[in-house]
Amino acid sequence: MDRQPDPLELWCAQHAVLVSLCPTLRKFLVRWSALCEEPEFRARCVPIASRVATAAVDEALEARRSYRIVDWALRGVASTWFTLAGLDDLATALRERAPITCAEDLIGLAELVAEARASVTASLLVHERGARYEVGTLTATVSRVGRESGWFAAWAVGNMALADRQDASRVSGVWFDAWCAVADAVRIVFLADADADAIARGLAACQASGLALLDEVAALRRREGPARAAPPTRMTRITRAARHAHVLKVAERVHRAALGNTGGSAGLVRRA
């Protein structure tokens, strides 16, 4: 079965135009929309695709966008689920931390995140006593939250931006502890949810804030004066010409697929 075109590919094909693509924003939007099984969510991504496709691109902007997305996941998404699980103190502690703007800020969360993981696990043990539930349903719910809340997509962005660092293992450790804490918080919500609506409310909150963030960071423009150098990524290491050729190939393929068997021209209007 053929893969469904993502919102960014659809926008490029429908408008018959090739534009410069920001690797960070593309990774986040495409991965999230692919992981989310709700057609309504994918439809909400399409209008944002035009702003992602035309976003300014340079290494400094890549760094700023990457850390904004990482910060949204570690402080925003996590605190949403902590609040729904009744762990307001943990949620407040995360929200009150300074925004993550560099790898050092992320690593600086290690102690707080580890403590949060231990606290959430202890709370989960209390909720599990005497509880009756279907293990498969609970496992599927946790996986669904990881996919549809944008957490997994945000981690893909963080991994792309930070994987080449010498302290990448420490960064991964923070992400692992954070996800364990979020997953256990989701389990608490699942077990304590009398009206079966809390999971849906949590996903709706995460999706709304995540799409708003995506729209906001797509609008970022270059700062005046020297800017912080972006961490090297696989996309920024290749040449501009190679990236342009890659995007052209993808856009041509999607455009032909969109035309189907109509016999129309598959040519694109190219923009350097």
Image (cartoon, rainbow, N blue to C red):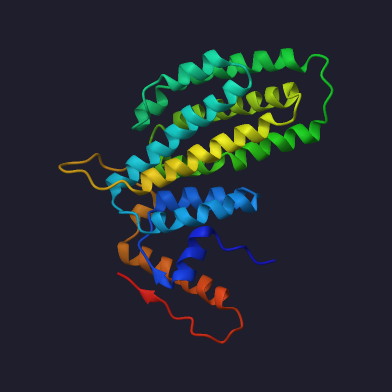
Residue at the location (32% across, 67% down)? 241
Compare residues 230 and 69 and report the one nearer the observer.
69
Residue at the location (57% across, 74% down)? 257
Check the picture and name the quadrant holding the N terminus: bottom right
Asked if one can make out residue 82 in the rendered structure from this viewpoint, the answer is yes
Residue at the location (82% across, 19% down)? 131
Asked if 167 appears above or below 252 in the picture, the reply is above
Compare residues 217 and 122 and report the one nearer the observer.
217
Residue 29 in percent (x, y) is at: 49, 50
Residue at the location (61% across, 36% down)? 203
Residue 42 in percent (x, y) is at: 58, 53
Check the picture and name the quadrant holding the C terminus: bottom left
Asked if one can make out residue 231 in the rendered structure from this viewpoint, the answer is no
- Would you say 84 lies left or right of 12 here? right
- Would you say 214 lies left or right of 37 here? left
Residue 83 in percent (x, y) is at: 58, 21
Asked if 175 appears above or below 82 in the picture, the reply is below
Residue found farthest to the left: 225
Residue 35 in percent (x, y) is at: 61, 48
Q: Quadrant of residue 99?
A: top left
Instruction: Count numbered badges in the picture.
Output: 0
Q: Quadrant of residue 269?
A: bottom left
